[in-house]
Amino acid sequence: RYMKNFKLTKETKQQIIFDIQKYFSDERDEQIGNLSAELLLQFIIEKVGPAIYNQGIHDAHSFDSEKIEELYGLEK
């Protein structure tokens, strides 16, 4: 539900679009325009973003759980 409101700053979005274009140029010897790179970025955000977000939530939960267990270990 939080991914629907996901927004990149203008600067970050422009940098990622540039990076996508550079990747295509360097790795695939292809040139793609801003619109194609932006559409690819949007696709990645929609399709891959939720999995990355969910993994981040899982990792944060695991980290917090470990720290809470450490706190309980300090009980006298």
Image: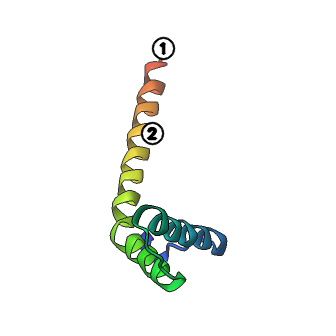
Q: Nearer the viewer, residue 69 or 59?
A: 59
Residue 60 appears left or right of 47: right
Q: Nearer the viewer, residue 30 or 53?
A: 30
Q: Amino acid at mark 2?
A: Asp
| Category of crowding for the residue at label 1, using alpha-carbon neighbours closer than 10 angstroms: few (below 14), some (14–19), many (at least 20) | few
Please identify the residue farthest to the right as the structure is shown. 11
Q: Quadrant of residue 4?
A: bottom left
Which label is found at residue 48? none
In what element is the residue under mark 2?
Answer: helix
| Residue at the image position 36 percent from the left and 52 percent from the top | 55
Disc nearer the start of the sequence (2/1):
2
Which label is found at residue 76? 1
Comparing labels 2 and 1, the label whose residue is closer to the camera: 2
Where is residue 20 shown, x and y percent of the image? 49, 68
Colour setup of the view? rainbow
Residue on which disc 2 sits: 64
Q: Nearer the viewer, residue 26 or 5?
A: 26
Where is residue 31 shown, x and y percent of the image? 48, 77
| Residue at the image position 50 percent from the left and 72 percent from the top | 6
| Residue at the image position 33 percent from the left and 71 percent from the top | 47
Where is residue 8 shown, x and y percent of the image? 57, 71
Residue 16 appears left or right of 47: right
Please identify the residue farthest to the front as the structure is shown. 29
Q: Amino acid at mark 1?
A: Lys
